[in-house]
Image (cartoon, rainbow, N blue to C red):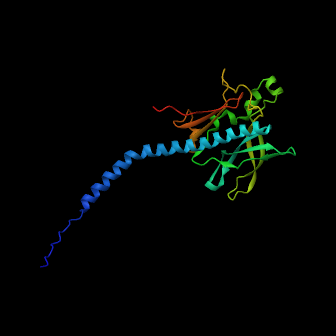
Amino acid sequence: MMKNIASKTRRGFSLIEMLIVIGIVGLLLAFAAPNLFSLIGANSLSGEGTVIRNQLTLAQQLAVSKSADVEVRFFNISDEASGRANQAFRAFQLFQYNQRGDMVSISNFFRIRPPVMIHEGLSPLLDANQANNASKSDKKFGFVSPREGECPAPVGVDGTPKMSDYVAFRFRPDGSTDLPNKSQGSGDKDTWYLTLVQGEGVENQGGTPDNYLCLQINPYNGQISEFRPQAQ
């Protein structure tokens, strides 16, 4: 004999219950969002810092292996593709002399991805005036960086080459650099720094940013060290 199975009626969520659930989820997201954004920002800084550090290490290795100077150029450009018209150090590239004695690029043109950017005020490595403070002995032996220059770079929206300003220094065949022994205001320490920060306009706020990544280059042996702010 077939028995009829009575189906049980399932009650759905009421509008009030749905609103309560949505409210709780929204509250949890509100608490989690600041930490999430901080984590994303820290990862962006770490990622861009790693790219620059790896390329600086590669430049030193190429100078040693090929027994020829390798020049690292940091370009002061606008970012037309992202609608950023202000000039800033947003890209870098490696160069080396070829067999004909011409300085040619030996790497890709690396753009620093926004919102990460170089804080020029906290980057003496990009201050060409620092070379003016070198001693007569340093200048005699070619320690004349950072130096300014201009060359074509693919900075247009479609990669069109345009004459662009840059600041550069070189790694030498023995692994050292052509940076003077002391940078201005460094006291008894040899400090050649490149500082990355998160977000446009941070360099205009004054003081030290809450979040940054600092790369230090030892002028004697080319060693690259990385510094981050300590967690509070």
How far across and down, in percent of the image, does residue 218 sit? Answer: 68, 29
How far across and down, in percent of the image, does residue 99 sit? Answer: 86, 45
Direction from residue 131 to residue 110 in the image, left or right: left
Residue found at x 76% / y 38% = 65
Note whether residue 198 is visible.
no
Residue at the top extreme of this rendering:
188
Residue found at x 66% / y 28% = 191
Question: Toward which corner of the image does residue 197 lie, by quadrant?
Answer: top right
Residue 140 to residue 22: above or below: above
Direction from residue 223 to residue 70 in the image, left or right: right
Note whether residue 162 is visible.
yes
How far across and down, in percent of the image, does residue 164 sit? Answer: 74, 48
How far across and down, in percent of the image, does residue 133 sit? Answer: 75, 26
* Quarter of the rendering occupied by the C terminus: top left
Direction from residue 42 to residue 66 in the image, left or right: right
Camera-nearest residue between 28 and 54: 54
Residue found at x 70% / y 49% = 109
Camera-nearest residue between 104 and 90: 104
Residue at the left extreme of this rendering:
1
* Quarter of the rendering occupied by the N terminus: bottom left
Residue at the bottom extreme of this rendering:
1
Residue found at x 29% / y 55% = 21
